[in-house]
Amino acid sequence: MQFKKQYDVIKDLATDIYHHPELGYKETRTKQIVIDHLKHVNPNIQFEEFSLTGFRTSLGDGSKDLHLAFIAELDAVYAPSHMYADKETGAAHNCGHYSQVGIALALYNHLFTTGAYKELNYRISFVFVPAEEYLDLDYRDNLMKEGKITHYGGKPEAMKLGVFDDVDMSICVHAIGGELSKRTVEVNCDLAGFLYKKYTFKGKASHAGFDPFSGKNAYNMSTLFNTAVGLGRQQLDEAEHVRINPIVMDSDMSTNVVPNHIKVGTDLRTKTVDYLKKAAVKLDDAAKGSAIALQGEVDSHTQMGYLPFVQDRYLSTFAMEAFKENNEIPAITNDNFISAAGDIGDLSYMMPCIQIGYSGFTGTIHGDDFIDIDPEFIYEIFPRYLAQTLKKMNGIDKSQIYRRTYEEYENLIASIIE
């Protein structure tokens, strides 16, 4: 009853956020809207703020043995051609994060207003995290230089700041891309991990008409690199779902000068950390060989993206049990893998995490036409299912919970980059 009663308010709030997208670490308006709503629901609410625009609030106290985080992501994607993109910033909510926020608020409202959180044998915190999308990197580089952040992603930054130090397990939710014929939830959808590689090919400038013989063409080196990447794909393990997408990031070229430098960037995605390291070596060798073949040089730079996300199968059993007893949702998908990535993978290294998917959209996720078409499912029925899942999780076996430290996480990242 409570979910139906609050539906219009939640839907309108999420729609407002959809039409006012903000990029990572810039979600000031979104943050204020969420905080204002939560204060209206619970005038005595307390917040812990972090990472410029992130914040956390809890229901229940520290007397309970376990602590669960329910995570919602605040940021938008850079997609200036989207039909509702911000004209000044190019931000657009074609990732579905705006609906995550609405779902989190619907769940909080239910738990607080009905007092249902008191029936949980664990404490629950709602963590609103900035900057899940890996973009706007120049801005984030400046934040790093100013000492305001350490990580590009909001969850690793929160991990570093201790936001999850007292948390034992986490749940996130995410829109399922594409229009489905039935209302659907998704469990155990694992994600790739990725590195961001930059190669600066260096040659020698000369007059392209009068004396091309003295030049060393950096652009040709990058072309050879693209060819090597293409031909080398047959040597990559198909089971690892490897993805490589080189782009030209920077150059200084004119038609009458042999170009002496060009920067190429690419992400490198794989299913596992071990193969991420192996594929990175192959990519580096392709760049080196392409430069040497045309008597040039190449500088390489490796930047960590996100770790692969392997959903915790034990926690997912509670989501599946809730689905079996649910009479409102007709379909569930299980055990998919997609080559998308998210910083939930980093958090899952430290503790058990699951990310439950939900349908209700049309258009291509991250595409120009992405929008919700079934708000009743997204903001009423799906949160009601999540409440059932949370109740099922009263039966959690503490021995199934693992924990790693942020220092262990740092060591893993260092080993990958090296």
Image (cartoon, grey):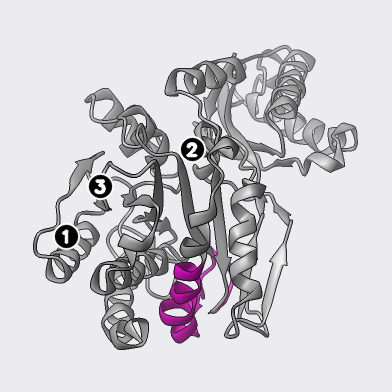
**Quick check: 286 left or right of 47?**
right
**Magenta stretch, residue numbers:** 361-388
The location of residue 233, given as percent across then percent down, is: 84, 37
Task: Using the image, tell me which numbered label, if any, was put on residue 61.
Answer: 3
**In the displayed image of the protein, which residue is found farthest to the left?**
43
Q: Which of the labelled discs sits on residue 123, or is there none?
A: none
Q: Is mark 2 on a helix, strand or loop?
A: helix
- The answer to which image quadrant residue 106 occupies is bottom left
Mark 2: give few (<14), some (14-19) or many (20+) Cα within 10 Å: many
What amino acid is labelled 1 in the image?
Answer: Gln
| Nearer-N-terminus badge (2/3) | 3
Residue visible at 56% across and 20% down in the picture:
412
Name above or below for residue 252 compared with residue 131.
above
Mark 2–mark 1 distance (CA, rounded to whole Å): 25 Å
Residue 208, quarter of the rendered image: top right
Tell me, yes or no, whether the two marked residues, 2 and 1, touch with CB atoms within 8 Å: no
Q: Report if residue 371 lies within the magenta region.
A: yes
Q: Is residue 131 left or right of residue 377?
A: left
Q: Where is residue 110 in the image (x, y as percent from the top left)?
A: 32, 73
Mark 2 → mark 3, Cα distance in angstroms: 23 Å
Left or right? Give the position of 281 relative to 170. right
